[in-house]
Amino acid sequence: MQPSDLAMLVTLDALLQEGSVTRAARRLGLSTPATSHALARLRERFDDPLLVRAGRSMVLTPRAKALREPVRDAVALSARVFEAPVAFDPATEERGFTLSATDYVMVVFGEALERQIRGRAPRLDLRFLPNSVDDAERLRSGETDLAVGIYGSLPPELRTRPLITDRFVCVVREDHPTIRGRLSLDEFVRVDHVQVAPRGRPGGYVDELLAERGLRRRVARAVPYFQVALAMTARSDYVLTISERIAKALGPALRLKVVPPPLPLEPFTLSMVWHPRFDGDEAHQWLRAQLLEATAGADAHPRARRRLSATDPTTGAPAKRPRK
C-alpha cells in the first residue's frame, strides 16, 4: 500500500459514512471541490460510481454499501498504529518471555525471581531454555528475549548488564578416599574430573591454565547441568570445579565438601544480554529490573571478569583475553 492509498482510504470512508460530498469534505477538513475530485478518482479506481444522485441527496451504490463496513474497520485499525501504547501494568500484563539460562541461575537466584514475578505479575509467563552457542543469534532473531550467562565476544548491537559475580571452588564427596582438607596441583591433575559444559563444549578456562603449566587433566564426564554434575560428584571419586554459590547452596545436602582450587582461578561476572529492540519496551524493562533486584545484595568479587577463557564460550573460537 502506498501512502496515497491510505489517504484515499480515509477519504473513501468519509464519503461512505456521510453519503455526501459536502459533509465528507467538512469531516476531512477539505474543500468541497477537492473532495469531489477525490470521489472522481475513487470512482475510476473501483470502476463504480459509489455515490449517485437521488433527488436532492446522494445514495450509495450496492458496491459502496458492501465496502462501507470493511473500509470503516480498515481505517479504525490503521488509526491504532498511531495511538499511544497502553501503559504497562505488571499486575494485569498477559505476556510471555523466553530466556536462555543455565540451572545455576534457577538455583542461585531463581527462587527470588520467581517470588517477585509470581507476586507482582501473576499472568506473566516465563519459558527457560538452556544456554547455547547460538544465544546471540537467538536474541537477534527473536527466538529468545533475554539471555543470562558468561559471554565473550557478542555482536556489537547487543546490550549487556552485569548481574552477579562468583568464584570457582572445587568439590568432592565428604568421604573421598584421598582428598582431605586441601588439594594439591599434582593430585588435581591425577584424579578424574566432572566438568560442567552448558554449551556442550568441553575444555576451557581450567584446561587453559593447566596447559600454560604444561599439565593436563582427564575430564571423565562433561555434562550440561550444574545439578547433575554435583550429584555425579557426590556418588564418585571425581573432582568438580564449580561456582561457589551453587556449591554452597546444594553441596551440604549431597554431602559434598568444598576445597580451594590449586590454580589461581579468577572470579567471573554473570550478565544478562538482550537485543536493543527491547530498550523501550516497558515489560522487558520491568523484567530486567526484576533480575537486578533478585541478585541485589549478593557479595561482589573484585575484578571479576566477563570473559575467563581464551576460547570464546559462544563460538569456541580463540578470543583475546581482556586486561586485568
Image (cartoon, helix red, strand yellow):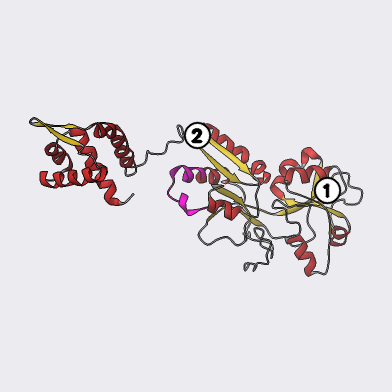
Circle 2: element type:
loop
- Please identify the quarter of the rendering in which residue 155 is found: bottom right
Query: Is 55 left, or right, of 318 in this rendering?
Result: left
Helix, strand or loop: magenta stretch: helix
Query: Is 66 left, or right, of 283 in this rendering?
Result: left
* Farthest left residue in view: 56
Above or below, comparing residue 57 to residue 139 in the picture:
above
Q: Residue at x 83, y 48 (%)?
A: 172
For label 2, the crowd category at 10 Å Cα-Cα, with few meaning under 14, some 14 to 19 and many 20 or more, is some
Above or below, comparing residue 250 to residue 304 in the picture:
above
Query: Is 45 left, or right, of 116 in this rendering?
Result: left
Q: Residue 121 — which label?
A: 2
Front residue (pair 278, 161): 278
Q: Amino acid at mark 2?
A: Ala
Residue range (magenta)? 273-287
* Farthest right residue in view: 177
